[in-house]
Image (tube, helix red, strand yellow):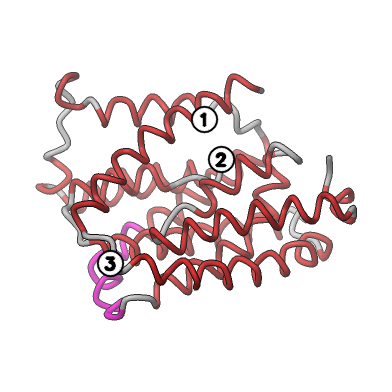
C-alpha cells in the first residue's frame, strides 16, 4: 500500500488508531511515539512511507514534551551536545535510508539492547559513560541519530545513555524529546531535498499531528504520578520488549 492509497477511509481510520495509541503512550511516559507507531504503520504501508507520515506528528509531540515539566532550558544547556551529534547521525542515517533498505539495521539494534541488558554477564561495562561524558555524547548521539534516520527509532540508545548518566525522569523526557526534535528536523530537510516530503505527505500527516497532540495531552495527566525509580525500571523492561519487537519485525520481512 502506498501513500496514494491513504485516501481510502479504512486506511485513514487505521492510521488514526495507530497514531492515537502511540500518542497515548508517549503522553503517559514522555517517550515512545515513533517507536510504537512506525512498526505498526509499516504493517499497512512500507517503512519509508510510515516514517514520512510520522515526521510532522513526531515534531509536534516533541515540542510539547520539551516544554512540559519546566526548566527545560537547564536540561538543554547541559545535554545539548547529544542532540547535535544526533542531528549529524540522523543526516547520515536518512541518506542511508534513501539509498538502502533499513531492515539490516533492526537485528543490529536488537543485539545492542541484549548486550546492554546483560552487561554484567558479558563483562561489557558502561561506567565510562559517566566518567567520560563528552565521548559518550559523541558515541551515543551519532549512534542514535543513525538509527533514527534508518529505522526511525533512536530511543533505545538514548535510554541506555540516560540510565548510565542517572538522569531524573523529567530531565530524561526533555532530553529525549529534544534529541528526537533535532533528528526529525534534519530528517525532514533531507527528505525535502530528495523530493519525498510532498504536499500529499503533509496533507495526510497534518490531521494525524493534531490527533496525536490531543491524545498525548490527555496521557500527560498520568505521567506525574509515576515515581522516578518505577520509571527507570520500566525503561529497562521497555528495552527488553524493544529487542524482541525488532527481531520479530526483521524476521517477518
**Residue with the mark numbered 1:** 105
Indicate the quadrant containing the N terminus: top left, top right, bottom left or bottom right: top right
* Nearest to N terminus: mark 2 or mark 3: 2
Q: Mark 3 points at which residue?
A: 170
Residue at the image point whose x is 84% and y is 44% from the top: 2
Q: Position of residue 228 (x, y in %)?
A: 21, 58
| Mark earlier in primary sequence (3, 1) | 1
Q: Does the magenta stretch include residue 79?
A: yes
Q: Quadrant of residue 126?
A: top left
- Mark 2 and mark 1 lie on one chain; the one further toward the N terminus is 1
Q: Residue 253 carries which label?
A: none
Which residue in the structure is indicated by mark 2?
151
Q: Is 176 placed left or right of 43 in the picture?
A: left
Vertical order, 168 against 34 (above or below): below
Residue 217 screen position, x and y as percent: 50, 73
Q: How crowded is mark 3: few (under 14 residues within 10 Å), some or many (20 or more)?
A: many
Amino acid at each position: 500500500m502506498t501513500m496514494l492509497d491513504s485516501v481510502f477511509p479504512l486506511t485513514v481510520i487505521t492510521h488514526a488508531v495507530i497514531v492515537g495509541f502511540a500518542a497515548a503512550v508517549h503522553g503517559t511516559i514522555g517517550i515512545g511515539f515513533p517507536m510504537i507507531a512506525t512498526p505498526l504503520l509499516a504493517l499497512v504501508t512500507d517503512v519509508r512511507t510510515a516514517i514520512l507520515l510520522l515526521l510532522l506528528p513526531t515534531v509536534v509531540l516533541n515540542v510539547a514534551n520539551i516544554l512540559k515539566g519546566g526548566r527545560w532550558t537547564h536540561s538543554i544547556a547541559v545535554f545539548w551536545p547529544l542532540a547535535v551529534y544526533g542531528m549529524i547521525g540522523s543526516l547520515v542515517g536518512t541518506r542511508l535510508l534513501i539509498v538502502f533498505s533499513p531492515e539490516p539495521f533492526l537485528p543490529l539494534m536488537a543485539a545492542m539492547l541484549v548486550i546492554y541488558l546483560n552487561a554484567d554477564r558479558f563483562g561489557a561495562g558502561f561506567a565510562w559513560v559517566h566518567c567520560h561524558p563528552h565521548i559518550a555524547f559523541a558515541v551515543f548521539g551519532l549512534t542514535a541519530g543513525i538509527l533514527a534516520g534508518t529505522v526511525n527509532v533512536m530511543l533505545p540508545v538514548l535510554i541506555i545513555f540516560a540510565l548510565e548518566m542517572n538522569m531524573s525522569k523529567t530531565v530524561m523526557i526533555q532530553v529525549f524529546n529534544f534529541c528526537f526534535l533535532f533528528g526529525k528536523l534534519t530528517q525532514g530537510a533531507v527528505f525535502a531535498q530528495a523530493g519525498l516530503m510532498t504536499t500529499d505527505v503533509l496533507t495526510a500527516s497534518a490531521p494525524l499531528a493534531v490527533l496525536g497532540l490531543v491524545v498525548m495531552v490527555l496521557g500527560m495527566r498520568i505521567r506525574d504520578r509515576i515515581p522516578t525509580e518505577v520509571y527507570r525500571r520500566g525503561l529497562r523492561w521497555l528495552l527488553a520488549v524493544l529487542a524482541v519487537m525488532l527481531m520479530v519485525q526483521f524476521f517477518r520481512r
